[in-house]
Every structure is written in C-alpha cells, then in structure tokens.
Amino acid sequence: MSPTSAGPAVAGRDRLVNGEVSFWHAALGGRPQPRARLSHGSHSADVVIVGAGFTGLWCAYYLKQARPDLDVLVVEKEFAGFGASGRNGGWLSAKVAGSRERYARTHGPALVMRLERLMAEAVDEVIRVADAEGIDADITKSGLLQVATRPAQLARAEHAIAADRRWGRSERDVRLLDAVETSERIRVPGVLGAIYSPHCARIQPAKLVRGLASVVERSGVRIVEGTPVTEVRPGAVVTPYGTVRAKIVLRCTEGFTASIRGQRRTWLPMNSAMVVTEPLDQRVWDDIGWSGCELLGDMAHGYTYAQRTADGRIAIGGRGVPYRFGSRTDHDGRTQSETIRQLVEALRRHFPGVPGSAVRHAWCGVLGVPRDWCTTVGFDRRTGLGHAGGYVGHGVTTTNLAARTLVDLALEGDTELSRLPWVDRRVRRWEPEPLRWAGVHAVYRLYHLADRLEDRGGATTALPARFADLIAGRA
C-alpha cells in the first residue's frame, strides 16, 4: 500500500492513505485474491447477475435458497464488493430511501407502512444470515442516533417524529431524545436532542460482502471477476470475452449503472466519501462516551454519518464533492483533497478532542440516485430482464429486501414482496450534461449555504434548502 499525502489539514506522524478502494478492504489486507475472469467463447446459465455487490450477491443467495438446481452466474467488472458494498459507512439501517408520499401515490399508505416494517425486519434478516452462515462482520445491533445541534435541526427532528407517528411508527420504532438523554449516550458539542431508532446495526461492510460472496460460491454459484459488462439485453450479457446467454438477466450495478450501454442517465452516480482515524486512546473515548456504539448521523442538510468501529476508531463520511461530470466514477476510491478537508472539519466539529492528525485513511465511492430519489425494483417477464437499485445511500439493508423482491419477481411468484410499492416504478431519466452536473452542484451549494445560515441560530429550515429540494426533485 502506498500512502499519499492529503495536505496540512491532516498532517501527522504518518501520511494519509487516499483510496486503495477503502479502509474496510485495507483492514483485511487490501484487495482480495482475484477470482478468474470469464473465459473467451460462448457461455450459458439459467440466471446471470451483473454486479457482485450486496444486491447481486443477495440475489444469488436467495435464488439458490429457493431453487438449488438453478445455474447462477455472477459477472463482476472488478472484484466482489469493489463498489459501495465495500466502501459504505457500515449502517445496517431500516431507513427506506425516498419519499413515503411518492410511494403512497401509486400503492397507498398501507403498503408503504408495510414496506417500512419489512425494512426493520430485514435488519434482523441480515444478522440472521450472517450468524447462520458464519460470517463475522463486526455486527452490533446498537441503534441509530441522529443528533441536532442547531434550533432548525431540532425543529426538523420534531417534524420527522410527528410524521413517523402519522405513518404508524411507535415509540418502539423511533423516539426523540432531549439534550440530557442524548449526552448520556454520546457527547457532541452543542447537542440539543436526537432521534433514536433501535432498528440499526453496525457492520464492517467489506467483511460482510466478502463473507457473503464465499457463502454463495459454496452454494454452487459461479462468480467471475475482472469481466466488464458492456451491454445487457434480453437473454444475453455482453462482455469483451464473449456473450453469456440466460433466460433471466438481473442488473445489480447501482452507482455504476451509467457504464452500461443505454443507461447513462438512468441513475446518477452520487459521490460519498469517508475518513477513518487511528484507534483512539481510552481517555478520548471517556470524553466522548459512545459506549453503546450507536450509529451516528446528524440533522444538517450536508449531513455526516459515522460509526465507532470494532477496533476503536471513528469512521465518518459525507457527500464532499457530490458528482463528477459525465457520470464518471472515482479511480480506486481516491477522493479529492477538498473533500478530505471537509470531513476532517466535520470530525473536529462533532469530536473536538480528536485531532485531525489522527485521520489515517480516506476513500470514496458512488451510490445510485434515481431522478425521484426512490428505490426501484423491476422485472419484465417478457424479456427476462430485471434490476434493483437506486438506494440513495441507504443500501446496506435495502439490498437484502430489494434482492428478495427481485428474486420473487424473477421466479414468477405472486408474493407480498412482489407487490411492494418500489416494484416497477416508472421514473424519468436524469437531464443530459451539462445540466446534470450544474444541477447537482447547485443543489449541494444551496444545502451548505442553508447549513451556514442555520449555524446563526434560526429556528426554521433555511430557505436555500427548500430551493435545493425543489431542484433535486425531493420536495
């Protein structure tokens, strides 16, 4: 591993590693031993899955659970877990991506509430499978804290709790903590309160995705790596080494979907980045608290997300530079120095006792964002083509439930999952460049402006954030 300096904001005894896919993979020794690529020639399978991230691997797992006789092939451009599955914040959260109201317009509120309940159950399902299959992923079901440190943030938290109650979520699902209750769990400067939900667990994502890949291989699934897919069409997946024929083809490419022919504007690859500290001294933890290892977020518009790792580090992430022109993606997880600077500032803001020099590794990845910011799962029985994705940063748990939904659809089962409100959503495509790039960057500039205005003490959401929601299509 070759460390790379990130500038004086994080200068210290050692130089900062930037990229190398992610800290999570680096902690396991770096890139895994590569699997073989697809050999030249013609190939066939009953089901071909494009993408060996969580969605693709969960699809393979549940296909073999339902039909052990199926010949399932997973085709991956890099290695299993190379994308967001091995780079995320490690939140196994029950949060449903997107707007309840949008889902309800097509399927009604009852199914939206059922989707939320199934997401909470999916947290436990992932934990169950990991335990049953012997996957050690540092899983701790510790819940989620979203802290408010400004009056406007606290008002948003109160509004969110009121909305949760209207949608049938009880105190057992989510509740508002006051400043004292929050500080008993974690000491963040200026905290006014927090939203707490028990439906969240900490994971080490690279451990989970690598473990899941090994499990599906043992079940008889074939995984080929180093094999880019250039085109997905009915009955076939096209690669530089040959075409794979299959009755069922499932596209599970999330933030890398734009690389598939004809999919450039389907989902926007949104950047998210992280930094992680060295293991911290016990005196630092005594000042912070956080003995419960809850996952940590905030109520800012340019929000951050964090976890206390199993080996006593703080890993913290945020959007940074949100989008690269032309839907380009990063190179091996390397992120911009400005993004690192912003994340170190966020670390110091929430944990002033942790010096910026404690930061040891930075990386980034992309997540898939549909134009309406809502997850979608679809399968066309006529063509045999299916897809799942658009998790907008809430994918670790969602991949499990979305994959089970896609498997039910592909096996032609009329089930509770096949009727969920994210099935067969029709969403318009993103705007062409340069409108796409200009729009995304304008949105996040407005969010950051709104945060600066709210830092002055206003009690309501700043107007720039409302404009940003309208531009983004989230309002």
Image (spheres, rainbow, N blue to C red):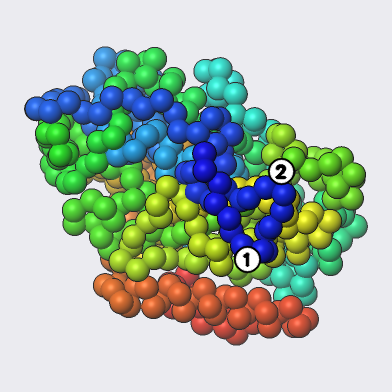
Q: Which numbered mark, 2 or 1, is in the foreground of this view?
A: 2
- The type of residue carrying mark 1 is Gln
**Which numbered disc flags the more N-terminal residue, 2 or 1?**
2
- Confirm or deny contact between disc 2 and disc 1 (CB under 8 A): no
Classed neighbour count for the residue bearing mark 2: other residues with Cα under 10 Å, few (<14), some (14–19), many (≥20): some
Can residue 426 be seen by looking at this rendering? no
Q: Which of these two is toward me, 380 or 232? A: 232
Compared to residue 199, the image places residue 153 above or below, namely below
Is 276 positioned to the left or the right of 443 in the image? Answer: right
Q: CA distance from mark 2 to mark 1?
A: 18 Å
Q: Secondary structure at mark 2?
A: loop
Q: Which of these two is toward me, 147 or 228? A: 228
| Residue 388 % position (x, y) | 35, 45
| Residue 471 % position (x, y) | 44, 78
Which numbered tag is attached to residue 42?
none
Residue at 39% over, 65% down: 324
Is 3 positioned to the left or the right of 255 in the image? Answer: right
- The type of residue carrying mark 2 is Glu
Image quadrant of residue 76? top left
| Residue 269 % position (x, y) | 38, 58
Residue at 77% over, 74% down: 151
Q: Residue furthest left?
A: 42
Residue at 84% over, 41% down: 281
Mark 1, residue position: 342
| Residue 167 % position (x, y) | 60, 56
Q: Secondary structure at mark 1?
A: helix
Image quadrant of residue 50? top left
Which numbered tag is attached to residue 278?
2
Compared to residue 264, the image places residue 404 above or below, namely above
Residue at 55% over, 30% down: 28
